[in-house]
Image (cartoon, grey):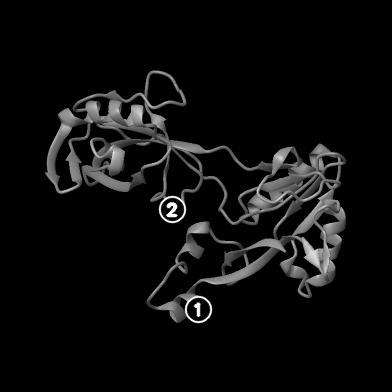
């Protein structure tokens, strides 16, 4: 089968992906965490059954086989076959309200291609939201990036406390050239260093994309803020600037929702 384990709450509603991560690679309190973070199977597809390879069978037939081999109907993802855009939009809205991250649109006549969605699967989920966050710290990189700042600590200003509250770190999606430019831009604002860790005065602002407000500790790099929005980081410094995050609505929780169709569009989500 193709599917995943999803963390759920007491009502069976999906929880953000970060919840299930609490059960990964644990050495201590394994039994306790198993009780605290309950998981359920969400089966999307059937690839092999009763000695028969189904990879080349159309999706609609594989899903029927899936229902036949999984005794618990609630563990099988829901599917809607339609070419009505309004029905698909309503299906997506219902999935988001239930706590899923979105839907998958699938060609109901397509074969299964392991490791490659191709043009037969399209994911639909809300756009990434952004925040303006100030860089208050960093860690030196390793290997070929040892001379660059490689991980950046991001903070938002707490107006009531008059200080910066740490939101999380960002370390991916930045090229070596961009890291070199950021290092040059940030070095004049270093306040202190302790081994690999560096503390900055608040001067450089990153525009950071995120998908959930539930766990702001896992932001994703969208590039530092410049005069206009662009995909490549180009930091804007403003010494003594007091940045505050822009308001942003949250995207849906990150449990996976499966879905859909492309020829005679079908929509499928995980329950």
Q: Earlier in the sequence, mark 2 or mark 1?
A: 1
Q: 204 and 2: which one is in front?
A: 2
**Residue 167 image position (x, y, % from top left):** 34, 47
Q: Residue at x 39, y 34 (%)?
A: 174
What is the residue that sits farthest to the bottom in this orientation? Answer: 31
The quarter of the rendered structure image containing the N terminus is bottom right
Q: Residue at x 81, y 44 (%)?
A: 107
- Whole-Å distance between the Cαs marked 2 and 1? 21 Å
Sort mark 2 into few (<14), some (14-19) or many (20+) by Cα contacts within 10 Å: some
The quarter of the rendered structure image containing the C terminus is bottom right
Q: 85 and 258: which one is in front?
A: 258
**Residue 164 image position (x, y, % from top left):** 24, 43
Dot 2 corresponds to which residue? 215
Q: Residue at x 61, y 65 (%)?
A: 5
Q: Which label is found at residue 35?
A: 1
214 relative to 24, above or below? above
Q: 62 and 249: which one is in front?
A: 62
Disc 2, SS: loop
State which quadrant residue 270 falls in: bottom right
Pointers 2 and 1 in contact (C-beta within 8 Å): no
73 relative to 169, above or below? below
Q: Which label is found at residue 253?
A: none
Left or right for 156, reference 186: right
Q: Residue at x 68, y 52 (%)?
A: 95
Q: Is residue 23 visible?
A: yes
Q: Is residue 155 visible?
A: no
**Residue 190 image position (x, y, % from top left):** 15, 35
Disc 1, SS: helix
């Amino acid at each position: 089968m193709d599917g995943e384990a999803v963390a759920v709450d007491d009502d069976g509603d999906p929880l953000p992906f970060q919840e299930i991560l609490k059960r990964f690679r644990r050495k201590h309190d394994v039994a306790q965490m198993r009780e605290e973070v309950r998981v359920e199977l969400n089966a999307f597809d059937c690839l092999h059954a009763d000695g028969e390879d189904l990879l080349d069978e159309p999706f609609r037939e594989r899903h029927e086989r899936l229902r036949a081999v999984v005794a618990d109907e609630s563990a099988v993802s829901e599917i809607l076959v339609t070419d009505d855009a309004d029905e698909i939009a309503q299906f997506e809205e219902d999935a988001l309200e239930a706590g899923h991250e979105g839907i998958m649109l699938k060609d109901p006549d397509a074969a299964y291609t392991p490791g490659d969605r191709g043009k037969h699967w399209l994911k639909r989920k809300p756009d990434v939201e952004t925040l303006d966050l100030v860089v208050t710290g960093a860690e030196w990189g390793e290997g070929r990036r040892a001379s660059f700042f490689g991980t950046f600590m991001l903070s938002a200003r707490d107006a009531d406390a008059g200080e910066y509250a740490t939101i999380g770190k960002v370390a991916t999606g930045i090229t070596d050239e961009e890291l070199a430019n950021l290092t040059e831009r940030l070095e004049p604002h270093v306040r202190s260093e302790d081994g690999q860790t560096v503390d900055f005065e608040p001067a450089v602002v990153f525009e950071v994309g995120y998908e959930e407000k539930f766990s702001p500790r896992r932001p994703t790099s969208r590039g530092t803020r410049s005069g206009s929005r662009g995909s490549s980081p180009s930091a804007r410094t403003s010494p003594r600037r007091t940045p505050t995050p822009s308001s942003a609505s949250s995207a849906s929780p990150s449990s996976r929702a499966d879905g859909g169709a492309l020829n005679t569009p079908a929509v499928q989500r995980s329950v």
